[in-house]
Image (cartoon, rainbow, N blue to C red):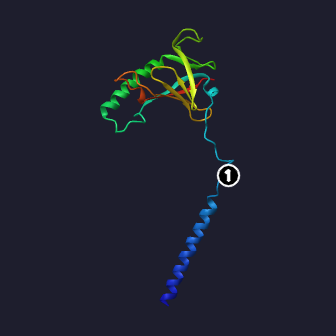
């Protein structure tokens, strides 16, 4: 009698496991490659237009090997506030199709005098402003915000590599 009860429990266990596996298989039907969303790779033309500063933050550089010290974080935050103050005085950043960028001064609706002007290049799906700090502009989603990070420092005390700015397209 005990053997029958043990066999019945074993069979019931295998049956339950089989039914759960079958239900899980039916619930996780594969997505066809045609329906899977492709990764967004921006084109040069996606950067052209006018952009307004929308966010600013500091974070440890991606290539930092050790955890940041409280002093490094405090220095980066103070530096971020200084640089954000500069960008906040601007109306917008204009990127033109002919390879120029213009940081427009507050109240200047034309491409005349500017706070900072220059040229840009496009490489590996990113737009690069030709400045000492080598700003890199990226768009990670179609119609999304543009992110600006910096890839070079101007001196031993600068913290540009810690900074990230968000820019929203002006319609």
Whole-percent x, y for residue 156 in the image: 34, 24
Outermost residue on the top side: it is 113
Give 49 or 41, whichever is nearer the viewer.
Answer: 41
Q: In the rendered image, which quarter is residue 76 located in?
A: top left
What residue is shown at x 64% (from left), y 58% (from top)? 29
The image shows residue 63 at horizontal and vertical percentages of: 41, 36
Q: Residues within 10 Å of mark 1 (few under 14, many from 20)?
A: few
The quarter of the rendered structure image containing the C terminus is top right
Is 76 placed left or right of 92 in the picture?
left
Residue visible at 42% across and 21% down in the picture: 83
Name above or below for residue 22 compared with residue 32.
Answer: below
- Residue 119: name its quadrant: top right
Q: Residue furthest bottom?
A: 1
State the residue at coordinates (38%, 26%): 159
- State the SS at label 1: loop
Q: Is residue 28 above or below residue 60?
A: below
- Position in image of residue 88 (x %, y %): 48, 19
Which residue matches tag 1? 32
Out of 144 and 128, give the one closest to the viewer: 128
Does 74 sit above or below residue 94? below
Q: Name which residue lies at 55% across and 77% down.
A: 12
* Location of residue 86 in the rendering, given as x and y in whole percent from the top left corner: 45, 18
Q: Give the total number of marks visible in the rendering.
A: 1
């Amino acid at each position: 009698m005990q053997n029958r009860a043990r066999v019945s429990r074993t069979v019931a266990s295998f049956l339950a496991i089989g039914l759960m596996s079958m239900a899980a298989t039916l619930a996780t039907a594969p997505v066809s490659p045609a329906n899977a969303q492709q990764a967004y790779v921006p084109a040069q033309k996606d950067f052209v237009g006018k952009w307004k500063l929308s966010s600013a933050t500091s974070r440890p550089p991606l290539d930092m090997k050790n955890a940041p010290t409280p002093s490094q974080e405090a220095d980066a935050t103070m530096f971020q506030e200084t640089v954000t103050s500069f960008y906040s005085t601007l109306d917008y950043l204009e990127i033109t199709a002919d390879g120029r960028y213009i940081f427009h001064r507050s109240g200047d609706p034309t491409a005349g005098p500017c706070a900072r002007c220059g040229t840009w290049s496009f490489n590996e799906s990113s737009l690069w402003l030709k400045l000492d700090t080598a700003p890199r502009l990226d768009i990670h989603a179609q119609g999304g915000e543009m992110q600006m990070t910096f890839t070079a420092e101007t001196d031993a005390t600068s913290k540009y590599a810690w900074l990230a700015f968000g820019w929203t397209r002006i319609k």
